[in-house]
Image (cartoon, helix red, strand yellow):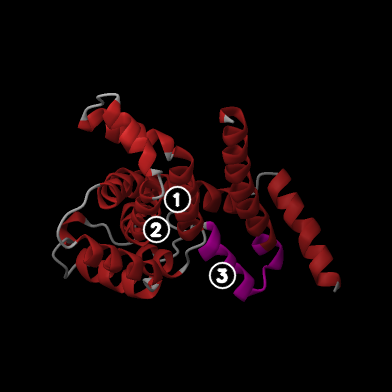
């Protein structure tokens, strides 16, 4: 058990003294997750709202497809995106392979079903009395949609946090599309996988602690926001 305690104290030193390798992986992770969340929320929330708010032919089948994609294997996503952005793929001229942007494409595809499905569920869970009241007050279609979207804002935040948890802990897509290149595309999760396999237990613990801290800070911020709105 000594190597665990020693690795933990070494990890604290790496964090406190701003070890370049450690913080390089953290910065890359922040860049990647920010880019992935921007696109997944920007695309997923409007699609999820339309899926939950409007009634149209094929809606039930589309909802089934979205729910099925919640269990989309990460390796399959990585393979699919790799085939498109590799040099021989249709998007090869963009040179996205082994870049943060290429990794963000794969993570966005992983997060989209989560955002769409949870956003649709949030809209569907609104009481029918809310819509009836808005119609009685003469609210237009746009005003009614905006009000419904506002009323389920906390559920949408939960969808965002859930999607974030999926992509920030992702290894397969990041490894396949980013190549785990040091100082360039190495994220916290891929660095933990590599360094722990090499026997650098301290660096793995340091990165794990920082990953937990990032997730804790995000959830704490969400809790504070809920209390302020209550």
The residue range painted magenta reads 188-204
- Residue 159 numbered tag: 1
Residue 197 vs 114, above or below: the answer is: below
Label 3 to label 2: alpha-carbon separation: 25 Å
Please tell me whether residue 198 belongs to the stretch shown in magenta. Answer: yes
Relative image position of residue 49 (x, y in whole percent): 30, 46
Q: Which residue is mark 3?
A: 193
Q: Is residue 79 magenta?
A: no
In the image, residue 75 above or below residue 25: below
Residue 72 image-quadrant placement? bottom left
Q: Is residue 156 above or below residue 118?
A: above
The residue nearer to you, when weighing 226 against 91, is 226
The reply to whether the C-beta atoms of the residues labelled 1 and 2 are less than 8 Å apart is: yes
Q: Residue at x 63, y 71 (%)?
A: 196
Secondary structure that dominates the magenta span: helix
Residue designated by label 2:
114
């Amino acid at each position: 058990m000594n190597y665990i305690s020693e690795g933990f104290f070494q990890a604290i030193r790496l964090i406190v003294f701003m070890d370049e390798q450690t913080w390089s992986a953290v910065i890359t992770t922040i860049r990647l997750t920010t880019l992935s969340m921007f696109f997944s929320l920007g695309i997923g929330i409007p699609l999820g709202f339309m899926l939950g708010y409007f009634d149209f032919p094929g809606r039930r089948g589309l909802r089934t497809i979205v729910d099925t994609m919640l269990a989309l294997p990460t390796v399959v996503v990585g393979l699919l995106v790799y085939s498109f952005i590799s040099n021989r793929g249709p998007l090869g001229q963009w040179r996205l392979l082994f870049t943060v942007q290429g990794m963000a494409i794969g993570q966005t595809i992983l997060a989209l079903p989560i955002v769409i499905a949870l956003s649709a569920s949030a809209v569907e869970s609104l009481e029918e009395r809310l819509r009836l009241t808005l119609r009685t007050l003469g609210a237009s279609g746009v005003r009614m949609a905006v009000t419904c979207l506002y009323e389920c804002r906390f559920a949408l935040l939960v969808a965002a946090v859930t999607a974030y948890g999926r992509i920030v802990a992702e290894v397969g897509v990041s490894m396949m599309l980013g190549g785990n290149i040091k100082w360039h595309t190495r994220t916290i999760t891929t660095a933990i996988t590599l360094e722990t396999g090499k026997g650098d237990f301290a660096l793995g613990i340091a990165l794990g602690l920082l990953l937990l801290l990032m997730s804790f800070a995000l959830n704490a911020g969400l809790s504070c926001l809920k209390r302020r709105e209550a």
